Amino acid sequence: MQIDSKGNVGGYPTLLVRKLVRRLNNLLIWDWETVQRILLVGPNEARAVVKAMEDAGFAKANRGRGPKAWTTTQLAQSFGSATAARPITRRTAEAAFALFLARVDRVNSDDYFLAKVTRVVLFGSYLRADASRLGDVDIAVELRPKEADRGRLGELNHQRVAECEQNGHRFSRMLDQQAWWQMETFRFLKSRSRSISLVDYQMEKEFVDRVPHKVVFSVQEEQAKSALPQPTPIRRAKRPKDCPF
């Protein structure tokens, strides 16, 4: 995601909102008092900032924790890692997307990964043929576990978490450990590419489906193609011995 360093979100400076979003992305749930403490503002302005975040799609109410609790969205995760750097050329964007698709093939064919990619959706400025300068390549990806048995998946995930901790990785939240089978794959697909903005399709489906988009890969479509009846090969009769040709 590309952002304008001189722009604003709901009347608040973009870089200020990005700073806040980065802090909130590390919290499972938060309220307007959390915003008040981070920004050092009064309660009325904190509420206004939360409203601006909701309008921008960065926050959604957490109904299970009461009417005054919120959580950040996947779009906020993308916004938090957004860059204010210079736009990229279409050639650079196309090269980055090609490398991304190669990583998709790697994930789906490599048994190391516990998740598989079942859908890739393009949206944003990359779809505009007339745009020669792009902020980045906006991609929504859907991940599913390769292991259908949830108990077995949990065991494999626990082993992977233990391996990562032995290699020095530190998990700040239990939730991150439980979702590592998905997060590890998501990170590999992103591969710290500044040209790729990656979001979780399941979490942002409503937004992605509402804007112009293009499905470039879908397991359902691939399965449908393989299910089509294949033409029966024509069995050629043996030529008679006295055939002149």
Image (spheres, grey):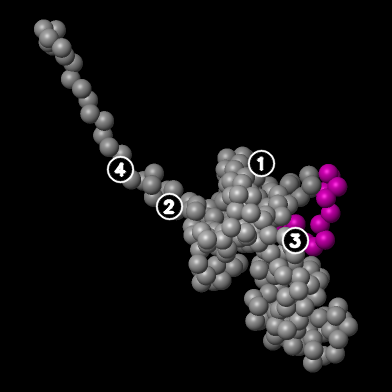
Q: Which residue is mark 4?
A: 229
Q: Is residue 171 magenta?
A: yes
Residue 94 seen from this side: yes
Q: Which residue is mark 3?
A: 85
Q: Amino acid at mark 1?
A: Tyr
Residue lying furthest bottom: 44
Q: Which comes before the other along the chain, label 1 or label 4?
A: 1
Relative to 13, does residue 131 appear above or below in the rendering? above
Q: Is residue 68 magenta?
A: no
Residue at 66 percent across and 68 percent down: it is 75
| Magenta span of residues | 165-179
Tell me whether circle 2 and circle 3 mark residues in contact (CB < 8 Å): no
User: How many numbered discs sit on the rendered protein?
Assistant: 4
Q: Which residue is mark 1?
A: 112
Q: Amino acid at mark 2?
A: Glu
* Front position in the image: 8 or 111: 8
SS at circle 4? loop
Residue lying furthest top: 242
Q: Which callout, 3 or 1, points to the residue nearer the camera?
A: 3
Q: Can you give x and y, in whole percent of width and height, for residue 63 in the image?
A: 66, 81
Q: CA distance from mark 3 to mark 1?
A: 34 Å
* Residue 198 as seen in the image, left or right of residue 171: left
SS at circle 3? loop
Q: Which comes before the other along the chain, label 2 or label 3?
A: 3
Q: Which mark is residue 221?
A: 2
